[in-house]
Amino acid sequence: MFDLSNRIAIVTGASQGIGNTIAKVLAHSGAHVICIARTEEKLKDITNQIKDSGGSADYISCDISDGNHFTNSIKTVIKNHEKLDILINNAGITRDALLMRMNEEQWDQVINTNLKAAFIGMKAAIRPMMKNKFGRIINITSIVGITGNPGQANYSASKAGLIGMTQSIAKEVGTRGITVNCIAPGWIDTEMTIDLPENGKEELLNRIPIGKIGKPEDIAYAALFLASNEANYITGQTITVDGGRVIN
């Protein structure tokens, strides 16, 4: 089960955190993974780690908020491998501020990286997936795209937008062998959450019935399932991976 042999996968934001772990898990399951992020040194490191453990991987250094650069990167993958089977839109940034203090640059940076880039990636990937009558698109959203969060109007809007866009595109391509789904992580132990204040961490932990912080592997294995043949009847869904977090 969950065998990705001969599959070609792109993972954005693969240089660290959740994306790093997703890339490793997909490669361990047989996929050839193209890791995409901005920092070339980190990309070299993750690619070498995958190869050293017996997996197959390459990398492309790319700022996905640059639409032309991201589109051309996907075209390069398709040219080199003659197909693209799996696209994981994972890359995301935060620029937190209360709305009254948030400037347009903070808004645009988050929307362009978290939402617009996913649109660009899916647009470039869907045609070759249709040609092969197979595709798995997985968008990493967030629980705050469902609940909202003070000081994160831009981030919450980008993640809520991903959910709506996923549902729409799933309806467009469902008859072509392509599934489109979201994973909404809760509190996951990554670089993005490491700076949370201790009192905030305690409050969050009290709202998680499982009683612990999630790990990147928890998201990566959900992505592996959705990328597999075994998930061929699941599309347009948002799967929350949050330890049963109590919303209210």
Image: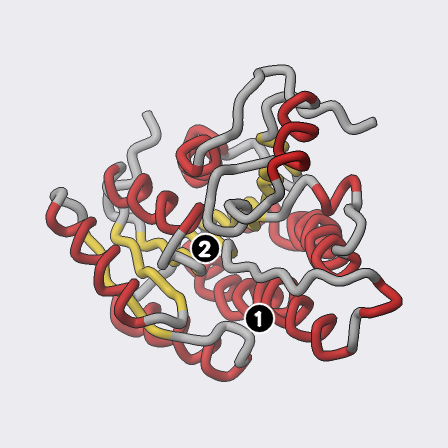
35 left or right of 185? left
Residue at the limit of the structure toward the right, as seen here: 100
Q: Is residue 191 left or right of residue 170?
A: left
Residue 72 is marked as none
**Mark 1, secondary structure of its residue:** helix
Q: Write the residue at 64% across / 44% down.
A: 142
Q: Quadrant of residue 83?
A: bottom left
Residue displayed at 36% across by 44% down: 21
Q: Split into 4 quadrants, where in the image is the C terminus?
A: top right
Are the residues flagged by discs 2 and 1 in contact, CB closer than 8 Å? no
Query: Foreground: 102 or 170?
Result: 102
- 129 vs 195, nearest the viewer: 195
Camera-side residue of 55 and 210: 210
231 over 78 or under it: above or below = above
Which residue is the extreme one toward the bottom? 68
| Place of residue 196 in the rendered image (x, y in percent of width and height, measured from the top left) | 60, 44
Distance of label 2 from label 1 (alpha carbons): 12 Å
Residue 132 in percent (x, y) is at 41, 56
Question: What residue is shown with label 2?
Answer: 87
Q: Which mark is residue 120?
A: 1
